[in-house]
Amino acid sequence: MKRSYQDQMHFEGRIWMLGALLLFLSAPVILSIGTGVWPTFAHFLPGFIATAVIFWPVTTIEVFTFSPMLGVGSTYLAFVTGNLTSLKVPAALNAQDALGVEKGTDEGDVISTLAVASSSIITTLIILGGALLIIPLTPLLESPTLKPAFDNIIPALFGALGIVYISKRVKIAIVPLLVMMIFFPLVPGSGGLVGIMVPVGVLISIIVARILYKKGLIT
Amino acid sequence: MAFLTSWWVYLIIGIIFFYVFLQSLVTLIKARKRAFELGFSKEQINQTITSSMVFSLAPSLAILIGLVALTKVFGSMIAGMRLATLGAVTYELPAAINVINGVFGKQIGDVLTPEMVITAVWVMTLGCLPPLILIPFFFKKMSHGMKEMRAKDQTWNQIMMDALFIGMISAFVGYILAPKTPEGETPYISVLGILVLATSAILIILLGFLMKKYKWEWLKNYALPVSMVAAMALAILYAGWGVR
């Protein structure tokens, strides 16, 4: 029996992703074999615990937060190539909006996949180029003149993206926006918590949306 | 630390880059075919591909800043591999610091031993694995559940999708107001960040107005990257005026 497009994407996506898992794991193994240097348990464990205690829950929640936004085809690629919030998710969103396709449909899914794949190709090539040309590029990338531009990529991205979405769904946006605009300035060290606060924001906005929808205040 | 630039490191990293590139390319080709089947025109498909590539230029260049920082520890090839796969600089840098500083008491930029570097690579690799395990084993079931829910109520599906994005956007708008804490300085809220956020928002509204008035349909795909890059360029100007 021939698989449906979605089932085929799941089938192939799983193979690609498990292949990536093996390949990514092979990098430190080969480094250790090649150099004869293996991390000692006493050094590895504290570093790993300090990292995993934050990033295992964060990356786990990311799967549940971002995969519905991305759709089937792009989820398998976006989580292999990373850089979800600054690249893959906005790219998918921008492409779907430009064509006016509904998110969560087959059409939305395929446009999101096109966007994420195109974005991944460019990012991979730029990073590879950057890695090969790091010596001549370093003075330019560390230039104090360009620093304010690169430091402010998140405001530049979310200003434009935010106004479009917030103006579309003002009633849903008010509460999560207020919560975040109070939380971040008031909590010391909150800058490092954005990974945790994304699912919190998503949860708040879904609860607000559900209440408004049930009360017939939004359609 | 000659091994960081040895031929076999280039080889394994080259294979990983090739794998990621190939997966992206194959996914793109299959999605393109599927888009035709769903009735999208060649022009719509090509425009989606081009605009997504254009949009990705500025954020990808920003990743190179992280590449410079990580290169000081891992050499450019391993640093590039870490940034082109799985996480993002917001994960890789703290994970590296947890080992270099937290375990070995050194700073990025200090002279490091191979043991320090290799321990950090192991921690960075294993510290963000969950998606690569969860997605192959559970995502299909999850997406079937989502599909059934969508079929039950299409209107709620659309509202929920918008709510998902608004939740993410709210978190990042709030994040811009998070106090910056430069070493040895008093924490401050970045007025520059707020100004850039507002500039970018105003620019996209302005572009929307121009699109409507002059019927510039082509601009629809590029309004986001144009607003973003222009706001980043203006950040240089604002910083020159002393805004921080």
Image (cartoon, coloured by chain):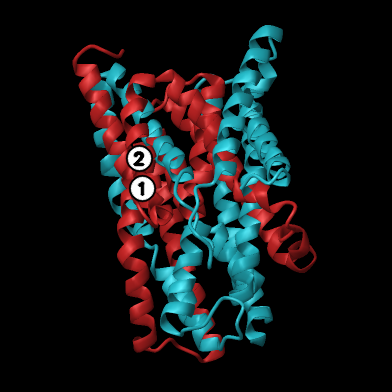
Chain colours: A red, B cyan
Image disc number at residue A186 = 1
In the image, residue A40 lies at what x, y percent? 39, 89
In the image, residue B59 lies at what x, y percent? 61, 46
In the image, residue A37 lies at what x, y percent? 50, 90
Q: Amino acid at mark 1?
A: Leu
Q: Residue at x 27, y 37 (%)?
A: A203
Labels 2 and 1 positioned on one and the same chain: yes
Q: Amino acid at mark 2?
A: Ile
Q: Quadrant of the C terminus of chain A?
A: top left
Which secondary structure lies at badge 2? helix
**Is A205 rendered above or below residue B9?**
above
Q: Is residue B100 left or right of residue A151?
A: left
Query: Which of the 4 image quarters holds residue B42?
Result: top right
Q: Residue at x 41, y 56 (%)?
A: A192
Cβ atoms at labels 2 and 1 below 8 Å apart: yes
The answer to whether residue B28 of the structure is visible from this angle is no
Image disc number at residue A182 = 2
Foreground pick, A20 / A5: A20
Give the number of marks. 2
Q: Is residue B91 left or right of residue B194?
A: left
In the image, residue A102 lies at what x, y percent? 43, 21
CA–CA distance in space, label 2 to label 1: 6 Å
Foreground pick, A187 / A180: A187
Q: Residue furthest right?
A: A136
Q: How many residues crowd around disc 2 within 10 Å: few (fewer than 14), some, or many (20 or more)?
A: some
Foreground pick, B70 / B232: B232
Foreground pick, A50 / A105: A50
Q: Residue at x 68, y 46 (%)?
A: B242
Query: Which of the 4 image quarters holds residue B217?
Result: top right
The chain letter under disc 2 is A
